[in-house]
Image (cartoon, coloured by chain):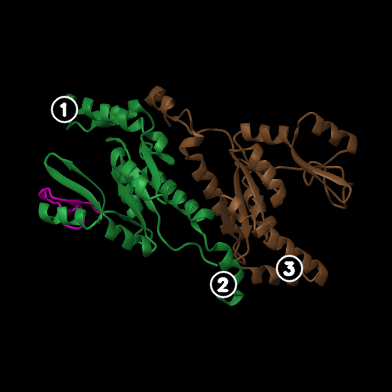
Chain colours: A green, B brown
Amino acid sequence: MEFEKKGILIVVSAPSGSGKGTVLSHLTEDREHFALSVSLTTRKPRTGEIDGIHYFFVSKEDFLKEIENGNMLEYAEYCGNYYGTPKDRVDELLSNGINVILEIETVGAMKIKKLCPDAIFIMILPPSFSALEKRLRSRGTNSEEDIQKRLETAVKELSCIEMYDYVVINRDGKSKEAADTITGIAMAEKCRVKRNPELISDFYDAKPDNEK
Amino acid sequence: MEFEKKGILIVVSAPSGSGKGTVLSHLTEDREHFALSVSLTTRKPRTGEIDGIHYFFVSKEDFLKEIENGNMLEYAEYCGNYYGTPKDRVDELLSNGINVILEIETVGAMKIKKLCPDAIFIMILPPSFSALEKRLRSRGTNSEEDIQKRLETAVKELSCIEMYDYVVINRDGKSKEAADTITGIAMAEKCRVKRNPELISDFYDAKPDNEK
């Protein structure tokens, strides 16, 4: 008897300054089990951005065609550009048994929640609000106005916490631990009875010879 | 910000022959995080059984008094003896941050489910029904009639699987892996947003100095 082989769609949100990027980079080192969902965008690539890695860069016409074809899990317009999640690639990864991580802000996450009842929703947080502020300031590259805006956005995002299944704290210098926690959550979810509808019939059918 | 410090009540059921005992003995080696709930019984101790370890051995009068005092999470009569779970000890362990494992058959588990909405329910299974039969026969100590009875009971228990949250497979020679899976499940459950109602207020209140 084997567990459900499909991957799990893991929706991850985090306020700016949570260190989400580092946590997720630890996770995706394990290519056998985790992959990031790459967004489609009509924005022009910035220096260093690679098509298929950072985004799939497409024309507005192609983006609109994808929407028409029902291939966008969610999408949004921001500063005149479209951004969205292509369904076909997510589905392909999931059916290959790979857990797909979808980095998305809370509004997009709510859309996904309606469309994908099997997805799990994780919010990554720094240890406290004051730690968040400290991290944003320590970057040194953000203006005071920008910092205030990011903090206001964080407050809005935190007010959506009830919509999330899990919260993972990213402590200073412990991003690997946070990544391991997410790996553990995915493993535990794989054991959920409701994710294994064939469990009992498989249990009766399996021959000892097939067991590993 | 710290996670909810209370332990989790982990209700574990498993058909006879699943190897549950070995799995749980690995878990309870970690005394800081796991403890078995010890049942109260009016049955006389058998050779080698220690009061407070295998059971709390009490008189029928004392058992009935515990029921009257509302201190039995669940209880049942079997072959003229009472068996049950004392609430006070479970609560004490949980409030000390220890996850309490309650080994119980499916009927008792259903009673607990109604009383303890925060408990999680895990069924430990061997890899297949034929493996279960093989394990029961390999013991060599059971009569054919006894084996058939245990298999019938297993079928009944398996029909209750939908009531459980998680299923953990105990593969031959891999009982430590099964125990680690249960540790992972408990860890993931600790990260559940719904188990951390103080999360957001703590997040705003916590000072960076308090962070570890």
Circle 3 — which element?
helix
**Same chain assignment for discs 3 and 2:** no
Calculate the distance from the C-alpha at mark 3 to the C-alpha at mark 2: 17 Å
Q: Is residue B23 magenta?
A: no
| Host chain of mark 1 | A
Q: Which residue is mark 3?
A: B136
- Magenta region, residue range: A38-56
**Which of the 4 image quarters holds residue B14?**
bottom right
Calculate the distance from the C-alpha at mark 3 to the C-alpha at mark 1: 70 Å
Residue A33 seen from this side: yes
**What residue lies at 59% left-to-right and 37% top-to-bottom?**
B7
Residue type (three-letter) at the residue carrying disc 2:
Glu
Residue A192 seen from this side: no
Q: Which residue is mark 1?
A: A143
A171, B161: nearer the viewer = B161
Q: Residue furthest front?
A: A68
